[in-house]
Amino acid sequence: MVGRRRMKEVNASELSSFLVLLLFMLCCCSQLSAAATVTYDHRALVIDGSRRVLISGSIHYPRSTPEMWPDLIEKSKNGGLDVIETYVFWNIHEPVRGQYDFEGRKDLVRFVKTVAEAGLYVHLRIGPYVCAEWNYGGFPLWLHFIPGIKFRTDNEPFKKEMQRFTAKIVDMMKQENLYASQGGPIILSQIENEYGNVDSAYGAAAKTYINWSASMATSLDTSVPWVMCQQADAPDPIINTCNGFYCDQFTPNSDKKPKMWTENWTGWFLAFGGAVPYRPVEDIAFAVARFFQRGGTFQNYYMYHGGTNFGRTTGGPFISTSYDYDAPIDEYGMTRQPKWGHLRDLHKAIKLCEKALVATDPAYTSLGPNLEAHVYKTTSGICAAFLANIGTQSDATVTFNGNTYHLPAWSVSILPDCQNVVFNTAQINSQATLSATKYIKPYSQDSDDIPESAWKFVKEPVGISKSSAFTKVGLFEQINTTADASDYLWYSISVDVTGNEPFLFSGTQTTLQVESLGHVLHAFINGQLEGSGMGNSDNSKVTLEKTITLIHGKNKIDLLSATVGLQNYGAFFDLWGAGITGPVALKGQNSTRDLSSGQWTYQIGLKGEDTGLYDNSGDSSVWLQQSALPKNQPLIWYMTDFDAPEGNDPVAIDFTGMGKGMAWVNGQSIGRYWPTYVAPQTGCAASCNYRGAYSSNKCLKNCGKPSQILYHVPRSMIQPGKNKLILFEEMGGNPTKISFATKQTSSICGHVLESHPAPVDAWKTAKSNAPILHLECPYPNQVISSINFASFGTPYGTCGSYSHGKCSSTGALATVQQACVGVKSCDVEVSIKSFGDPCRYTIKHLAVEAACS
Ligand SMILES: *[C@@H]1O[C@H](CO)[C@@H](O)[C@H](O)[C@H]1NC(C)=O
Ligand SMILES: *[C@@H]1O[C@H](CO)[C@@H](O)[C@H](O)[C@H]1NC(C)=O
Ligand SMILES: *[C@@H]1O[C@H](CO)[C@@H](O)[C@H](O)[C@H]1NC(C)=O
Ligand SMILES: CC(=O)N[C@H]1CO[C@H](CO)[C@@H](O)[C@@H]1O
């Protein structure tokens, strides 16, 4: 309307500049409409003719919900990412050959568009082998049954399917105009995945397969570069890239390709039965800074948000349902602090160096043993420097360009003007947070637990109960038999006993011996659970030996074998077996009866899986409600209603009391639960020294405790009012012990030394050089309500447990209260100017703990 009224008065030239402006605004407001060319040279990816320093992070779309995506991507953008990387998960998109599914969490196009709307780029790693701790590495199970197929090698049936799916995804992206050349966000794509780690096992065919993969991908004509990670011999024009905890020593296989890091592990994945791995942020920041110090221009965090393995998507065996990964955004979508903030500060510091980084290769000078300077300096005088102390023991003072700098051990300082330090990887300025798990009442306002009377149940029959069961001679491998249609396979046989059999001792006792490839085994004799066994993520095999008592006459032996995620990594991982391959025997003192080649009856899956118990879609009259709810008995389905938790905080279920099984909320699987699988007692340390090379078992916590007790229920799975929770309990548990919780940030903390650099934001604009302690409430409508601790001097401890040291300024609490209480965020200068000097000649620090409400 405004436009039309003005139109009368404007002349032609004004009109045309108005139109140009309009066009310009349209192009800038939506990344989807600005076409860009993407190429590369030896320094960097080149977008529209400019070399770029790009920070990327992995978010796997099916590991969260479409409702979570915008917030996760916004937090990634605020954390300083330019690119979101995701794999494409073939097996969820094509569960049956030729039948595609791109709905809900599988809506790849929506995910890519959500990233574009935030103004970020996408690195689409199609694979289609993805590893990713994902079931069967992302391959659909039906692939295994194609005659003559051999995975990931020069095999026609395999190549045909791989090409078909890759082309399908590329076409889909093209149709939606999602490639950069079409104005979309995709600037990079990946074919295959870490094949170089295993290719020697595939012999000469590996070489021809990789050449074929490269030319197949290139022929799809995406107009953006392709990469292969961990593939030293990636043929031109494919860029070979590095994956690992550190990639600074990596060089690409051609001086025409840039140094790119496609997987930097921000933490590590959790397995059922394992302790919880974490990676200190000082070490990740060190690894990233070292990468850019030594010539890198593109790096990706694996994972930036790990998320959840819903349903039966975990790889394995034994990958847990949580895929939190100790990532900068936690499983629930909350920023993990100070990891997220410290890396954000690092990204800002690196971006301040971008002009110098893209202009030239670094020049290296040694500043002493373990002390390195890399300088990016252009002829026009732009200069950026990275100073590193790669020693693990002692801090150092170095002289560089005539100035002296303090370099803590295992740290990098970034100098965007070759003079002033804006960031040191070991000096954290950003705030920490303490997150709390708040237990809530899920049922009614007067009851803490869901009362026993609110539970209904159905007993899953022991042994064969389905008409589709079949009998065969001998023991069959499980995955070949079930095609992974279910975790479960029953192996049943009956044995007649007269009492005189040589495999009996003391009456009708005998030893049942079962050997299984795993992953979990339950042995029932005449309907009773007699023993269970399970493997672990290192060795999935199970051996069960158990003295049992048989009866005269016919004895039923029902063995239930369960998988916990199919193998996703290693040469020929697709041929790993599972299930009971024998022997199965009854052993007496002198004589053994081998049942392995007997007549076995097989049942794939549970009866309740067939009749729709998990989403209550079948006959609801089968659910029983009795005064005595069966507890601690195997093979029970449970159902109850719960109230939608108030508010918007992320929701978790605490499965304390349960054994092992699967849970569904309103018909959607939130994954396998297994709170009884406890991590080993040893291997954890009270604290983890970030100095020195990291490895996946260096920093572990939670030893002797359940690997996973809390399970994420995304808000979008919960409806207002009543909600249905259904469980299948395999081993035995007490569902009345289950509790509900929400995840919250309970405190925010800062701990900054007066020797830290000033905030990177204040570069060149700050009035003083002093570092700043910045506090900010996590939610939009909150303000800082109280300061629970403040000390300037030598306080010690961590967020939630700070204590005053020998030296402490008396007015610190009042000063911080004055600056912070009642506002959403505050900045406090960490210097004697603000606090006075409680102890001269000592380096002082400010520690603050605050609450928001
Ligand atoms: C693979 O391609 C490279 C060039 O890209 C060539 O040198 C090599 O001989 C090829 N290898 C095979 C086994 O075809
Ligand atoms: C599965 O079946 C295929 C084809 O029948 C066979 O080659 C393979 O060895 C079987 N796998 C296992 C683990 O038994
Ligand atoms: C088993 O062997 C031992 C010694 O060889 C013998 O004494 C015993 O009677 C045998 N038991 C059975 C049940 O055959
Ligand atoms: C070589 C190696 O261990 N690669 C792993 C890197 O990390 C990703 C994600 O955890 C795994 O999928 C790879 O197997």
Image: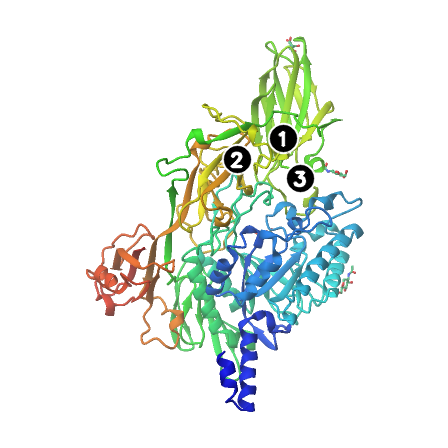
Q: Position of residue 368 (x, y in %)?
A: 45, 68
Compared to 487, does 473 lie above or below? above
- Residue 397: numbered disc: none
Residue at x 47%, y 37% (from the top left corner):
641
Q: Position of residue 607 (x, y in %)?
A: 63, 30
Q: Residue furthest left?
A: 810
Q: Disc 3 marks which residue?
A: 484
Q: Nearer the viewer, mark 2 or mark 3?
A: 2
Q: Disc 2 marks which residue?
A: 727
Query: Disc 3 residue type?
Result: Asp
Front-most of residues 87 and 754: 87
Q: Disc 1 marks which residue?
A: 607
Label 1 neighbour load within 10 Å: few <14, some 14-19, many 20+? some
Label 2 neighbour load within 10 Å: few <14, some 14-19, many 20+? many
Query: Disc 1 residue type?
Result: Lys
The answer to the question of whether label 2 and label 3 lie on touching residues, with beta carbons closer than 8 A, is no
Question: Mark 2 and mark 3: span between their CA atoms?
Answer: 20 Å
